[in-house]
Structures are given as structure tokens and as C-alpha cells.
Amino acid sequence: MSIAPAAPRASLPSTPTDYASLIGGNRVGAAGHVSIERRNPAHGVVVSRYPQATARDVAAAVEAARKAADSRVWSGMPGAERARIIARVAQLIDRDRAGLGLIESLEVGKPIGLIDREIGGSVALWEYAATLARHTYGDSYDQLGAQTMALVLRQPVGVVGMITPWNYPLLIVSQKLPFALAVGCCAVVKPSELTSGTALRLADILIEAGVPPGVVNIVAGYGNDTGRAITEHPALDMISFTGSTRVGREIGRLGGEALKKVSLELGGKSAHIVCADADLDAAAEKVVLGFTRNAGQACVSGSRLLVERSVATRFTEAVIAHAKALKVGDPLDPQTQMGPLVSEAQRDRVTGYITAGSDAGAKGWSREAGPEAALPGHFVQPTVFTEVAPSMSIAQEEIFGPVLCVMPFDSVAEAVGIANGTIYGLAAGIWTRDLDKAFLFGRSLKAGTIEVNTFLAGAPELPLTGHGQSGVGHEKGRYAIEEFTELKTIQLQFGSAPL
Ligand code: NDP
């Protein structure tokens, strides 16, 4: 895992930063609002305060977006102009990347030395989405008969409610918002109340880049009131949600009742499959990255290791050696590779799973705590379970922490059976030098993203899509155009005037 060599040590702010919502082009600050206080998950210090959206704020945000959509101020703008504004947002995120990175380090607990690459990922998404604003087009039909012609237009779906989780705050907003904007949609965005800072800071950037008032509205609040109010609002045309399968199911139900378009990016239990012929050193390093990046709080986390039995013991030892060497600690130290979990509730959930694994008979190894034990934060050490049965809860359910379950296999068919044996289907990693095997796995695995001899690589061009209960619909890539548009057919009947 490489660390930006020149990253300086960051320090805790002496006072929290106050943020404001963005509603109809206006910043709505703390006055008249309850503040949501965010404590840094490593030090327990309040670092951010967001104004909790009231019912009136949500109504105003939806009304502003609706008005902007109906006026066609954004969708009626030439694609080239929209592209310029979206590309400008990318430049401004790039300009402000150090500040945005610090916000996410303070609010999520992400290591400061690793965050720059992630903010760079957001820049790349906005850059790529800008190109799609000039490539949103439909079809034409000229073979329907001598006097008939038809056009199939792709029109923006309208106003999209976007609800995002706490684990990759700016990145996940950037997987949705620029793509929706590219095709001409307007939006109401609700980030997680735990980590709203970068989404609210993005509001300043959108204004500076020239996004017209009302096109994007960003409000902070809790899921079960603000999130729910957005989901149920009749004036929204679509909900684009990223989060847990549990909440996704509820949002799908509400969207179905209201006959709204719904796109869901949900949880995962991704398998890393390592064959005996693989480059085992490279694989061991990526397997550790796969389950400890962001302290394991990633939807695509490689939380199950399926390893060919002939190398299972040796490979597991190599994984443990890498995990032992990880620098777990203060996220503000540029040398840190893994920080704390995002909250006390998340820590309790993960440690609950670790206890359940041991109780079920799996054999656990955990890294010994270092100086980070002196911090008050929600640290959980990287943990590797062997002697895991595929039916155990630790092998079936999304833990969302730095916990790896190792299961040996003897054949491709057995590995595929174990890998496909959960409700999820988000991602998988395959390590082999045998192309036949790689394709066989690639074809058979139930997963929307499969990486061979790499892990967590990704690119804005490539879609993110969940199979099984990992999601409905897809994000990123040119396929995002389909998500945020709907078709309209215009059929023309000509008169019989001679040519
Ligand atoms: P949650 O599902 O708990 O929350 C996601 C968002 O939904 C938050 O903004 C939350 O607000 C809001 N919310 C909660 N309840 C409701 C409701 N009833 N109606 C509307 N909105 C609601 O997920 P987490 O934030 O805990 O994130 C972790 C989950 O996200 C994991 O399962 C992970 O796999 C998944 N995820 C999936 C990704 C993918 O691309 N497939 C990417 C990243 C994460 P609040 O925070 O206030 O509760």
C-alpha cells in the first residue's frame, strides 16, 4: 500500500467547521436549525456542525429542483455548455483537494496519507461525466415504411433524489451527481449525517462553477426523517440510493408504490479467489488492501478469501504477515494506513461479528494493538478467520470492518459455489496466471465487477453494478446515461407529396 511521501501531519482543528445547506441557490446556515455535531472517530473531538434539514427545508429543496427542471434552465442548455460547467467542477475539486481530503480524514477517519488518491477519483468522475453531456443521444428509424420516420429521444428523467452513505462521502456523490447533471437532470442530495462535510463543501464549488440556482440542492439530515421525506416526496422522479441492502429494500418498496424510478447500489460480501499458480506475493498484498482499505468499510471490500488448498496455509501466513505490518493509527499521521471505524455503533457491530465467528468455531487471528490504543477512537484490529464454514454468519453477512474469512477450495467449481453462495453479488477478485481459469471464473461468478490480478482498481468509464441483492441498476461509465434518462418516441407520418 503506497503512501503519499510528502503528506504533512495534519492537526485537529481548534474549533469545529460550520456548514450550510444549499437550497435554491441559497446557503442555509445554522440559524433556526438544530445542529448535527460530528465527532472525529479517532479523537472524539467535534470537528463539524451541519444544520439539520427541517421538513420545510426538504420541501423547499424539492420545489427549487422541480422549478429548475420544469424551466429547462439546465436541460435546455447546450450539452457543450453543461460539459464546460461540469468540467469546471472537476477543476475546482482538484484545486481544493487538500482541504476536501482533510474534511474526510477528520469526519470518516480516513488516513490523511491515502486520501489524496480518493479525492483524485472524484475529480476523474466529474471529468469523465463532462464528456457524456455531449454524448447523450437516442436513435432514429427510417425503415418503418415509405411515409414514416421515427425518433427515439433520450430525455432527462427529471428531478433525482440522491441518498448516500458515510464511507466514501465525496466519491459516492461523484458517482451519481455529475452523471445526472450531464444528461440534464436536477437533484436533491442527502449525504449521511455522519459525514456531510464534503458534500456541503461541494455546494460552494457548484456555485463557483456556474451551476444555476436550484439545479442542485444539498441538505444534511438523518435517514429516517430527511432521507425518508426525500424518498416519499411526490415531486421527485427518481431516487438514486447507495447504502445498505436493508435500507435499499425499503427505498425500493416506497419507490415501487409511488412508481418512481429507483436505482440501488447496496452491500456486498466479495470473494477474493487465489489459485495456486498466481503471483502469491502480489495477491497477498492486495488481499490485505481489499479487506483493510477504509478499515474494511467499503461495499466492494474483499471480505472472503477463497484460496486453493495446496497453498492455503502458506498464503494465509503471508496475508497475516502483511496485516501485522499495517500501520494502524491516528488518521492525521501521514504514515497511517488504517484508521478507526466510523462510529461506536459500527465498532460494536464489527466486534459483535468477531465474537460470533469465534463462538461458531472459526479460528481468529487479530493484529496486536499499538500506540493507537491510547486514542479514544473506535479502532478494531485487522482480523483473519480460518476454519470458517461457508454457512457461518461471518461468511454470509456484510460485516463492514477489517475482517477476513479464509476458506480453502479444491476445484474451480467448488470455489464458484462458495463465492456465489451469499445473497450478494457486488465484486470479486481472481488471482491466477491461467487465462482459461480467469475466464471460467469471470463467466461463472455472480458479481457486477470482477477484477483479475488486481483489486480496487476501477475507472470512471467502467460501470458499477450489483447482482443479486447488491443492487438494481448501474452507475458510472456511459451506462449512467441510461440510468438518468428516459426514452421518448416521436413517430412522424408524411403526406404523399412526390419528391
Ligand atoms: P445505510 O443504508 O444505513 O444509509 C445510507 C444512507 O441512507 C444514509 O444517508 C442514511 O442516512 C440514509 N437512510 C437510512 N435510512 C433511511 C430511510 N429509511 N430512508 C431514506 N434514507 C435512509 O448505509 P450506511 O450509511 O451505513 O453505509 C454502509 C452501507 O452502504 C453498506 O451496506 C455498504 O455496502 C453500502 N455501500 C454500497 C456501495 C455500492 O456502491 N454498492 C458503496 C458504498 C456503500 P443516515 O446516515 O442518517 O442513517
Image (cartoon, rainbow, N blue to C red):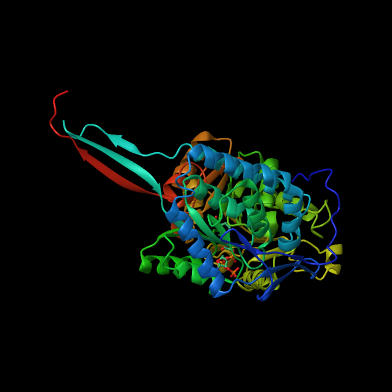
Residue drawn 49% across the image and 48% down it: 74
Residue at the limit of the structure toward the top, as seen here: 499
Q: Residue at left 65%, top 59%?
A: 200
The x and y percentages for residue 309 are 59, 50
Q: Position of residue 157 (x, y in %)?
A: 41, 53
Residue 44 vs 203, above or below: the answer is below
**Quadrant in the picture for the C terminus:** top left
Left or right? Give the position of 194 relative to 152: right
Residue at 64% x, 56% y is: 203
Is residue 409 something one can see in this rendering?
no
Q: Quadrant of ligand 1?
A: bottom right
Question: In terms of image quadrants, where is residue 365?
Answer: bottom right
Q: Toward which corner of the image does residue 267 lie, by quadrant?
A: bottom right
Looking at the image, residue 43 sits to the left or right of residue 359; the answer is right
Nearer to us in this view, 469 or 219:
219
In the rendered structure, the answer to whether residue 81 lies left or right of residue 170 reads left
Task: Determine if residue 2 is in view.
Answer: yes
Image height of 393 relative to 211, above or below: below
Q: Position of residue 128 (x, y in %)?
A: 56, 40
Q: How many marks?
A: 0
Q: Nearer the viewer, residue 253 or 221?
A: 221
Residue 47 x %, y %: 77, 66
